[in-house]
Image (cartoon, coloured by chain):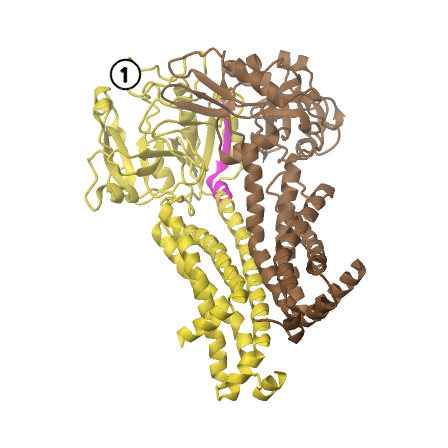
Chain colours: A yellow, B brown
Amino acid sequence: MTRHLLKLVWNRKRTTALVMVEIAVAFLVLFSVVAFGTYVLDNWRRPVGFTWDRVWDIEVASNTTPGRMSENISRSVAMPAPNAATGPAAPGREGDSGTSPAPPPQNTAPAGGGEGDPPVDPRYQTLQQLMLAIQEFPEIEASAVAAVAPFGFGGMVSVNDRDGQRLEYGGNEVTDAFADVLGLRVSRGRWFSAEDRGQAYRPVVINQDLAREVFGDADPVGRPLIELDEEERAAGRRPTRIVGVVDAYREDGEFDGQRNFEFNRKDIDYPAGGDRVPRHVLVRVRPGTTAQFEEKLVRKLQAIAPDWSFEVRPLSVMHEGQLNFTLLPLAAIGTIAASLLVMVGLGLLGVLWQTVTQRTREIGLRRAKGAARRDIARQILAEIAIMATLALIPAVIVALQVPLLGPFYWVEWHVYAIALAISLAAIYVLAVLCGWYPARLAAAVQPADALRYE
Amino acid sequence: MLRNYLKTSWNVLLRRRFFTAVSLFGIALTLSVLTLVAALFDHTFAVSPPETRMDRTLTIYFAEMSGPDMSRNGSPGYALLDKYARDLPGVERLAIASESEQVTSFVRGAKVQPYLKRTDGEFWQVLAFHFIEGAPYTPDDVARGNRVAVINATTRDRFFGGGPAVGRVLEADGQTFTVSGVVDDVPMLRLSAFSDVWVPLTTAKTDSYRHELIGSFKALLLLAPGTDPSAVQQEFKSRLATVEFPDPKSFNKIHARPESMFDTVARMLFGGRGEGDYGFRLRLALTFGTLLFMLLPAINLVNLNISRILERASEIGVRKAFGASSWTLVGQFLVENLLLTAVGAVLGVVGAGLGLSLINATGLLPYVELRTNVRVLAWGVALAALFAVVSGVYPAWRMSRLHPVEALRGGSR
């Protein structure tokens, strides 16, 4: 039966070829859009790991230039983040400069260069004064300093491939109060505390995704995240030690694709030479604090550091910005794709309709020889299904190249699998829906009419 | 002859309303999306105030400094532009301005976040702002670091509730400025000009920017009419080879390229570095993307057209039997398809207009008033013609190939 139908399709290959091309292209369009949507939804269902209800971000631009710097420092270990925005390179390698003024030589310590520590940035003093002033406000419950603020688009990304294994993780440098301000949940070990000060190790806290990827089910607490190599040990670099694991932390919120994350401890009271000056102060305000407090806060900070710039943004506002950034393009692409699909569906309907009208003689003959109406309808639908299948085989092979070649390496396999299943089902449903009416028309052909037509 | 074709095709369109509706839907959808994109590009790049001389303006938006171990890229610093971009042969004027960035102000207890741009005096000569009142600050103001500002109309309303503002004082980013002039709002997509408040760059909070090679400035180079941009690029490149580095062990090479605004935006979009001609790549990507986007609607239309032709097989048979050549038939069918596409294009432009007002209504881009104009319409017509040809040629060829005898009998398989 199938062979016979295949033969029928083959005999009309000129007419069907273009319809099949259309089905294949429609599938590819649908697959890309569905894969994007699945990726977004797949991220959305994962825990974010922190709360932002009453948290404000104060961006303290200690840049001595007018305007904020937009720059990337790239080194051998830095790679662009999946969410396109790249920040400074690996936090593990300290000494990337960037913000200090030029006349004292840029304190970019070359990798492996250990001759004398660069001087401590004088701006740390100002930062300490600012933090003291912030803590004095009764409206503020808790405050912490961070290199990168949540929902800030991009941040720091480290890429490590020492054992031939590619390991990528986002990072942030934060003070001890950070976990309290954002309500992070520590599931193993502990968060940073004063006991990490002046130790022979560099304390890090990682999230569960990173712990699972590096250590599997083993307990990562007390172990180094990345073993130092000979060169680094010779240069006197301190080894890392994982002191705790937090449940989750996805700094750009629900739609952040970054899985792995690492926190480094920042101690603004005891800065080391060459440390970058962090740019964000996160404060949690008391319930009922209004925007008027913002003016008071900024005026006070401005009075302490007249040559710095301050910008206060509630995290809820930044969160909304992130949502728009993800959802608006998705909505636009989704609308266009849906319209295209409707167009393809109606087009197919028209073409199949036309084909059936043309085959009146053939169908009439079958009816005269005793085929039931149901058989005719089934034949037409089966032919459409075969056409769709023949079109989809090459299309699926093309679509599979995306996960195989991996231009979007951060997208997991199951996202593609789900997208593939949804798009295949949608195309078959579309084909059958479009074939249903023509099939009924065909079934309604009267043998006598059809034969007279000849 | 043409009148006959049009008459025939009009009747054909009305005969099969379903086919016509589906075809028109596809064409209108495709063209409205493409016209919308064209309007966005037009809004960003077209010569329009205040960027009235962008056709002979080169921009330096990016710079990259590299050394043996690392590289650092961002915007050019003031020192780089001040020392090496001045008095290039063929360049009439050089304007240096920072990126516009949001700063915080409080007006009667309410928070306002205007964009602030710090510029030199030449900025007002290179760009042609329309002043509602007052005047720009002068190079002399800039040299002395006077706290003066030019604001746009919206900022005047926000800070002073309308009415004349020249001579009044506003506070932004913790500094106070006296308003010297008020200009029309500038859309955000006019990257070089856009801001809410413009102040002299010497009012920066410290003067360390003066020594930076990589910093946060952009340069606009207004070329003398008829100057070859590549000569300016060559000269600037050879000057950059002489840059003195404060710490040659870390960084010893610097790269920046004066290029057209289109090339600059292309570089921005591709995240490009180095010498590459990113404008060409963007043109290629846009062409390819347009064709790819047209592909599905075009195949759909081809299928519908072929079905329609087969339906008209007997008509074609008659015409062939009476001696119409294949070329005549191809011509006739292309005219019919053009008519169909033209109707679709009108609907598409209407759709694009709706889409544009939707984007304007969201207010995501400050002061951006996207609308269709003659240039955008021209793009729409060109794209529609391209679409008509792409979707019409194959069915027309099929039509002309029909065998007369078989066609007369009522169509082939």
- Whole-percent x, y for residue A354 in the image: 60, 72
Can you see residue B372?
no
Residue sitting nearer the eye, B133 or B297:
B297
Residue A103, given in percent of the width and then of the height, sits at: 45, 11
Residue at mark 1: chain: A
Which residue is at 59% across, 30% downward?
B115
Q: Quadrant of the N terminus of chain A?
A: bottom left
The amino acid at mark 1 is: Gly
In magenta stretch: residue A319: yes
Position of the C terminus of chain A, as image quadrant, is: bottom right
User: Along the line of sight, which residue is nearer the eye, B225 or A276?
Assistant: B225
Q: Position of residue A186 (x, y in %)?
A: 28, 42
Looking at the image, how many numbered discs can be counted on the residues? Answer: 1
Decide if residue B196 is on the left or right side of residue A305: right
Badge 1: residue crowd in 10 Å (few <14, some 14–19, many ≥20): some
- In depth, the one of A442 and A225 nearer the eye is A442
Vertical position of residue B67 compared to residue A140: above or below: above
Would you place residue B377 above or below residue A56 in this image? below
Left or right: where A150 falls relative to A454: left
Which segment did they paint magenta? A308-321
Residue A166 appears in the picture as rendered: yes
Residue A312 is left or right of residue B399, and the answer is: left
- Element type at mark 1: loop
Q: Which residue is mark 1?
A: A114
Give the residue drawn at x 51%, y 66%: A13
Q: Which image quadrant for residue A84? A: top left
**Location of residue B17 by image quarter:** bottom right
Q: Nearer the viewer, residue A229 or A276?
A: A229
